Image (cartoon, grey):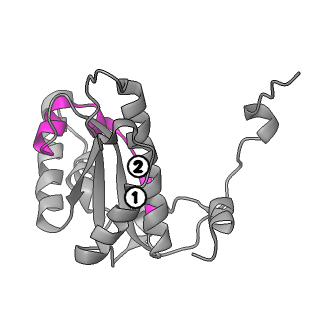
């Protein structure tokens, strides 16, 4: 990464089909996570965790999601079934970021959830710093209790999102961004 200002000015997600191997693993992934945890975390609760999905587990979980979708929705089209079966195999690595926000005598759950979101964005930036691309998505499995159980996510936990991770196979394409005047209110006397 050249510098933080340039990175933030040009940061963009890469379409999932354009993510290629390799993806981080082992000590490199641990180093990326050590950077990602440097976020606001009132009370030092670390109200988030990560489930890394790759290889045979990605294939197995995709089959489980296809079966789950079939049970919930009835028959799936061939295209939809194929999509669900490949759900976690579309990139070399999928990181499910989990919010462990829980009642606390001092730290509101909302602040813990914000910390989980900050952790997720920091994780994206850390992946980018190592030359990887990451696309943050949710989709139906994020909100489905049976899907969460298949992913070893406790009922009281929430999925912040899935980061699809790999080496960019194409440059990111810019998209329109909000005008600062539309998101800034200045209060001064």
Residue 118 horizontal side relative to residue 138, left or right: right
- Per the rendering, the mark at residue 36 is 1
Magenta region, residue range: 133-152
Residue 94 horizontal side relative to residue 70, left or right: right
Q: Position of residue 144 (x, y in %)?
A: 23, 31
- Whether the residues at callouts 2 and 1 have beta carbons within 8 Å, the answer is yes
Residue 159's place in the image compared with 11, above or below, is above
Residue 147: within the magenta? yes
- Locate residue 139: give its quadrant: top left
Q: Callout 2 environment at 10 Å: few (<14), some (14 to 19), or many (20+)?
A: many
Q: Choose between 139 and 43: the one closer to the eye.
A: 43
- Per the rendering, the mark at residue 119 is 2
Q: Quadrant of the C terminus?
A: top right
Is residue 186 visible in the rendered structure shown here? Answer: yes
Q: Of all residues shown, which one is farthest toward the right?
A: 189
Which residue corresponds to the image point at 49% horizontal and 68% vertical from the top-left? 128
Which residue corresponds to the image point at 45% horizontal and 44% vertical from the top-left? 40
Which residue corresponds to the image point at 46% horizontal and 55% vertical from the top-left? 122
């Amino acid at each position: 990464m050249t510098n933080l200002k340039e990175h933030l000015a040009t940061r963009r997600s890469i379409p999932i089909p354009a993510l290629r191997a390799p993806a981080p693993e082992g000590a490199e992934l641990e180093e990326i996570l050590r950077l990602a945890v440097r976020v606001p975390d009132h009370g030092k609760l670390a109200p988030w965790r990560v489930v890394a999905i790759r290889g045979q587990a990605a294939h197995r979980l995709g089959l489980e999601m296809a079966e789950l979708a079939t049970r919930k929705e009835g028959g799936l089209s061939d295209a939809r079934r194929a999509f669900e079966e490949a759900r976690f195999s579309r990139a070399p690595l999928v990181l499910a970021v989990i919010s462990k926000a829980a009642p606390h005598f001092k730290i509101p759950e909302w602040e813990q959830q914000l910390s989980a979101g900050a952790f997720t964005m920091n994780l994206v930036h850390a992946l980018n710093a190592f030359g990887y691309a990451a696309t943050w998505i949710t989709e139906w499995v994020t909100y489905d209790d049976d899907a969460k159980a298949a992913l070893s996510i406790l009922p009281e936990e929430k999925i912040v999102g899935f980061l699809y991770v790999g080496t960019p196979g194409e440059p990111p394409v810019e998209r329109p961004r909000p005008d600062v005047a539309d998101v800034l209110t200045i209060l001064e006397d």
